[in-house]
Image (cartoon, rainbow, N blue to C red):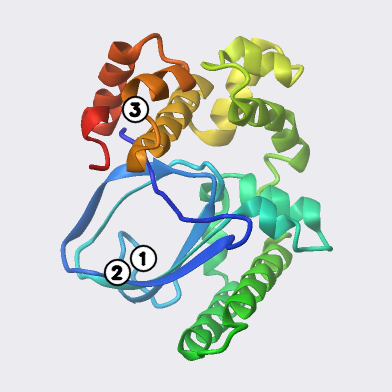
Amino acid sequence: MKPILFKWPLSASLPYQVEFYTLEKGFVEPNYDMHAAVHFVILLQGSLEKWKNKYDFFLSSAWEIHGKTYSRTGATLLVVAFLPDVLLNSVICDKEKISFFLHNPAVKYRACFLRPEVRARIRAFVEKMEFLEKEMRPNTSQKKWLEIVDFISDLVTLLDSYLPNKFSRSEYAKLEPALVKLASLENVPLSVSAAAKACFLSESHFYHLFKEFYGIPFSSYELYFRLNGAASDLSGGKMNVKQAASKWGFFDASHFSRTFKKFMGIPPVKYDR
């Protein structure tokens, strides 16, 4: 597995991106990726992996490892990415449910996106975005953002009774302190024992809960997080290899370079050149 960081150009002043993409026949993306942004893909034409019907929908939650995709026929896609924290600040109802939806790995409830009422809402969202894409007005960006907020709110309402019961919202809350601590970079690398302590859980309980929730051990998730953070800092020359190695908790530049090449496929000195 070689997860890479997809560099969504998002900020508090522009917290979303909407793009219509066309993939050529035989398209292959061999890598996995992860990012702080939530993003979703709506199939408009063609096929993408097992998705073959118009308005098929794929969502990736915050920091969920995903990717490694292909299209045999080619495809036209609507791709939307947004910062979950900014969206949560834009809603006043069901904030806890929406937060859970945006952070809980979406792979657990993808089958629910096939439900007729959900597909109807997806279609309405696409039609509105296609209309706004053609509209040339000063407030079009604001309208798009409000549509995204409404769409996510409506999805949560439609899916609420179908979301898995296996993990309650309190289960995510148990793990959240470890994710906050990881993102703070107070301790890099962050050990399993330190992460478990932040959650007031035993190391064994934390290990099993995290693996069951996210599908991979915390140690792997933590390494991918640091590698992606380093990749982001290396891009555009913001940091050199030695600086990135130090910031992201690698023993030295040599250790960082070996690990980076193993997982990213190229040496850090050649990344994003």
In this picture, residue 235 sits left or right of residue 195: left
Q: Which residue is mark 2?
A: 47
Q: Quadrant of residue 179?
A: top right
Which numbered mark, 1 or 3, is in the foreground of this view? Answer: 3
Residue farthest toward the left in the current orientation of the protein = 26
In this picture, residue 127 sits left or right of residue 253: right
Q: Residue at x 19, y 68 (%)?
A: 24
In this picture, residue 168 sits left or right of residue 105: right
Q: Residue at x 41, y 49 (%)?
A: 7
Q: Residue at x 69, y 62 (%)?
A: 156
Amino acid type of the residue tagged 1 in the rendering: Trp
Amino acid type of the residue tagged 3 in the rendering: Asn
Q: Which residue is mark 3?
A: 240
- The N terminus sits in image quarter: top left
In this picture, residue 94 sits left or right of residue 150: right
Q: Quadrant of residue 232?
A: top left
Q: Which residue is mark 1?
A: 51
The correct choice, above or below, for 121 with respect to 177 in the image is below
- The C terminus sits in image quarter: top left
